[in-house]
Image: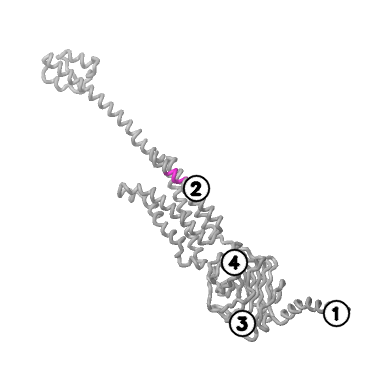
Amino acid sequence: MANLRARVGALVAILAFFPFFTFAQNNTTVAASTFFLSETETQFSINVANDSDDVFIYSTSPAYSWVGFGFGAKMENSLMFIMYPSKDGDNVTISPRIGSKKAEPTFTSAVDLEVLPGTTVNDNGMFVLRAVCRKCRTWPGGFLDVKSTAQPMIYAFGHGYPLYSDSKSANLKRHIRYGHYSMDMVAATGLGGVPANSPMLSGVQLKGKMTRDHDRANLAHAIIGCLALFVIWPLNVLFAGFFKNIRIHVGISVVIMAFLVVAYALGISTSAQFNRSQDYKTPHQVFAFIALAPIVLMSLLPIPSISKLHTLIPRLHTPMVSTSFLLLVLTGGLGLHLSSQARPVILGYTAVSLMVFIFITVLTSCIRRRGSAYARANNRKRVGEEDDNMVMLKKMDESRSSSKASFTQGSGTQSREFGADGQDRNQRGLYGGGTMPGPQYLLNMHPGVPVHKW
């Protein structure tokens, strides 16, 4: 009985030791160089098979929107392996890509990457990749130096919002962090096989710390566009409706145009960074170009040589303003979708757009009913001040005409009464033509006294 217990204990000890023995055997039989980043618990291990052209890969990392590793000192012409969650979120999509200079890497079919069993997104939300890459020691624009003890390598992380896709050419957002290191390919060369999980550096030299990246041009493009639409634009409508000085409206309009020019320039510069926008065929870009037509017309209509061509031309200004605003707001919303922004950001943009649109609509309706302050000021100047003077002058002329008529009638009566000669028929413009007797009236009582015009 004692011997039986001893044998069972020995068997249990052997079984308990077996996993460690297997792990040790795997570590000794599969050569590998391992990159491990303790900040994110990210591992990327390489095994170079000495009996074929195969390169085995093992990687673990938190499931960010995407995680990438590449052979090369920089993105340009580097062979990169990009991982992101599959469409259903329970597996890993691995995409081999060729890096571009300051642009999104592009999927390549020049290498054959085979995903092996054990690749998954585990319960802890970690990528686990087991794969073998065939024909990947050379690629368009570069090669893997298996004799190098310091092969340049790069790594990068996308944003925290997961990218769920089964497509190997899925659109990527710009990385938020990146870094460089080197790998010993000689130490990684040996019998082919997938490297084991190892939370420590092996055959790797880190080059500096991880760098945080900022997509400042794209951010400035969005901020400047929103300021022009949601802050300066409604203020300009407000000033145009309630300020008599038209120069304020013109000045703010020039500021809006300057903001839009900068926003367009930044948008064009950032379009070249992403595969989906390099051809300028996305809805965001198409609507942005369409919006240029009413913007240009809106800017040209106030020119005197154009506005005087027809009386209807000045009336087109308000419709062109409304059309430009709607097209630009729609363009901004499509831009958020193009840049894969989170749903709360898109909902917030939609809410702000609706509030500003309602404000401008109500304000424009009020201005149309009562007229702008500038138009009303001009009407008062033309109709009020000038017409008041004209009315006073007209009344004075009527009063003088009435006086002259009365005087002429009185003179004719006197001529018939006193039988004066033809001189009295031409007594126009003489004093005393009113209802009260004046000096001329007294003089007329004495025909022998000559009468002079004043």
Magenta: main secondary structure: helix
Amino acid type of the residue tagged 2 in the rendering: Met
- At 27% from the left edge and 29% from the top edge, which residue is drawn? 394
Toward which corner of the image does residue 60 lie, by quadrant? bottom right
Point out the frontmost of discs 2 and 1. Answer: 1
Q: Residues within 10 Å of mark 1 (few under 14, many from 20)?
A: few
Q: CA distance from mark 2 to mark 1?
A: 84 Å
| Residue holding disc 2 | 355
The tag on residue 89 is 4
Q: CA distance from mark 3 to mark 4?
A: 28 Å
Q: Position of residue 38 (x, y in %)?
A: 70, 67
- Which residues fall within the magenta stretch? 359-364
Q: Secondary structure at mark 3?
A: loop
| Residue holding disc 1 | 4
- Answer with left or right where residue 135 lies relative to residue 305: right
Q: Secondary structure at mark 2?
A: helix
Residue 262 visible here? no
| Residue holding disc 3 | 54
Q: Position of residue 356 (x, y in %)?
A: 48, 48
